[in-house]
Image: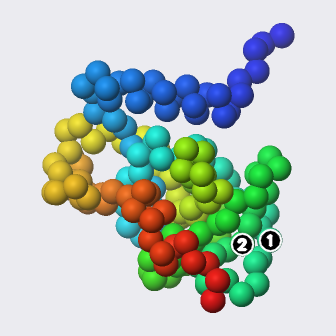
Amino acid sequence: MSKRINLREFQQNLSNRMHDKSRMGGQLSMLGVEIAGQNYLIEMTDISEVLSLPPMTPVPLTKPWLCGVANVRGSLYCVADMAAYMQQGTASGAAGNRLLLVAERYAFNAALLVERVFGLRDTGRWRQDGQQNYTDEKNVVWRKLDLVGLLGQPEFLQIGV
């Protein structure tokens, strides 16, 4: 019988290897995502998991960008539509939409709804404009999503209307 692979353990192992690589001088890979038609990068260590959209339960009297709560293996996560939060429309709800679960180390049961996930990106050879913008080999601009900054914004933390 073949050994079953636990997705959570696989993702944690991948995250640990990437973190070790960054300490040894390698470039830390980031996850490329699309939010409101724009390309963003998020550090892999800032998220714990990428999921397809689970069923969500609406929460009354909350900001329009809060989609509701989702039950992920017995834990409830508040789901924030990042396009709506940035006031750039809303996620389409298409099959390609994904949830990014915020890493446990931040102690937030939050999930970020993004339009789609492009996969890992190695920014080592990309041009960097300051701290937040990158340009890849094809001259496509990618913005870095500052998760720590997002989690510190009072507007993001205050979900009630």
Q: Is residue 124 left or right of residue 161?
A: left
| Distance CA(mark 1)–CA(mark 2) | 5 Å
Protein image colouring: rainbow
72 or 93, which is in the foreground?
72
The image quarter in which residue 159 lies: bottom right
Q: Is residue 111 above or below residue 22?
A: below
Say if residue 118 shows up in the picture: yes
Q: Position of residue 23 (x, y in %)?
A: 31, 26
152 or 62, which is in the foreground?
152
Q: Is residue 48 left or right of residue 61?
A: left
Say if residue 83 shows up in the picture: no
The image quarter in which residue 92 lies: bottom right
What amino acid is at disc 2?
A: Gly
84 or 161, which is in the foreground?
161
Cβ–Cβ under 8 Å for marks 1 and 2: yes
Residue ID at (65%, 50%): 51
Q: Compare marks 1 and 2 and give the one earlier in the sequence.
A: 1
Q: Position of residue 95 (x, y in %)?
A: 66, 61
- In which quadrant will I find the N terminus? top right
Circle 2: element type: strand
Residue ID at (52%, 73%): 156
The residue that mark 2 highlights is 68
Q: Which mark is residue 57?
A: 1
